[in-house]
Amino acid sequence: MYSVLLRQLLDGRRTAGEPLNIGALARELEVSQTPLREALARLEHTGLVRREALKGYQVADALSDREVAKLMDARMVIEPELALQAGLRTTPEFLDELRATVEDLDATVPHADDDPEGFRHYWTSDDAFHQLIAAQSDNPFLEHALHSLDGQMQRFRLFTKRGRTGAGNAAREHRLILDALQARDADLAASLMRGHIEGAKARVLK
């Protein structure tokens, strides 16, 4: 059920703020309410669904421009430092994994804005790139700080960037960061990460 509801969100069949009545969903999807409750609870942890007392579940609201700006400002505090620390600790295995996410993101560019499956691949490739760098930083406190933003980042990707992901820009910027990490230029990687997040902020808020 989780994958069914997630796909509906990614396909745009469930819109921001839409109520998710468990009884109605059970009838629509022809399933019992127990797996639906479990799926909605999992989606609540992603930030895409929220639950209100006495009202039940609903699709999360889209982020306001102010929320987007504050979210990206928070990332600009955390992620350049994560890139710097990862750049001081590069390993061949880490670089191979990171390169795979960059190549995956490259492949999504033609379809990220007009195909639900392409959008899903864009989303997962983009997230994997940032999470790998966070893990390689070897700083669990900074990594936890980034993870604390995960739910809001999911809302950002799904509701703010639909139809204008900037996948082409993101792919180029990810590759530049990868190149800096391969060159063991940690300072450059940090600077490029800052520019990457600033660019994403500007593209969404233009």
Image (spheres, helix red, strand yellow):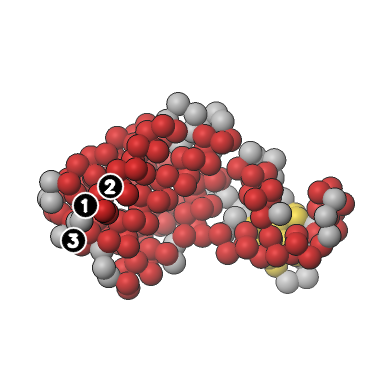
Nearer to us: label 3 or label 1: 1
Three-letter amino acid code at disc 3? Arg
Asked if residue 99 lies left or right of residue 42, the reply is left
| Mark 3 closeness class: few <14, some 14–19, many ≥20 residues within 10 Å | some
| Label disc, if present, on residue 135 of the rendered structure | none
Q: CA distance from mark 3 to mark 1?
A: 10 Å
Q: Nearer the viewer, residue 115 or 61?
A: 115
Q: Position of residue 123 (x, y in %)?
A: 48, 44
Q: Position of residue 96 (x, y in %)?
A: 28, 47
Q: Secondary structure at mark 1?
A: helix
Q: Residue at x 15, y 54 (%)?
A: 186
Q: Which residue is mark 3?
A: 89
Task: For the C terminus, give its image quadrant.
Answer: top left
Q: Which residue is mark 1?
A: 92
Q: Secondary structure at mark 3?
A: loop
Residue 198, can we see it? Answer: no
Q: CA distance from mark 2 to mark 1?
A: 6 Å
Asked if residue 26 lies left or right of residue 161, the reply is right
Could you say which quadrant of the image residue 168 lies in?
Answer: top left
Three-letter amino acid code at disc 1? Pro
The answer to whether the residue labelled 2 contacts the one labelled 1, judged by CB atoms less than 8 Å apart, is yes
Asked if residue 39 lies left or right of residue 154, the reply is right
Could you say which quadrant of the image residue 109 lies in?
Answer: top left
Q: Position of residue 3 (x, y in %)?
A: 65, 50
Could you say which quadrant of the image residue 86 lies in?
Answer: bottom left
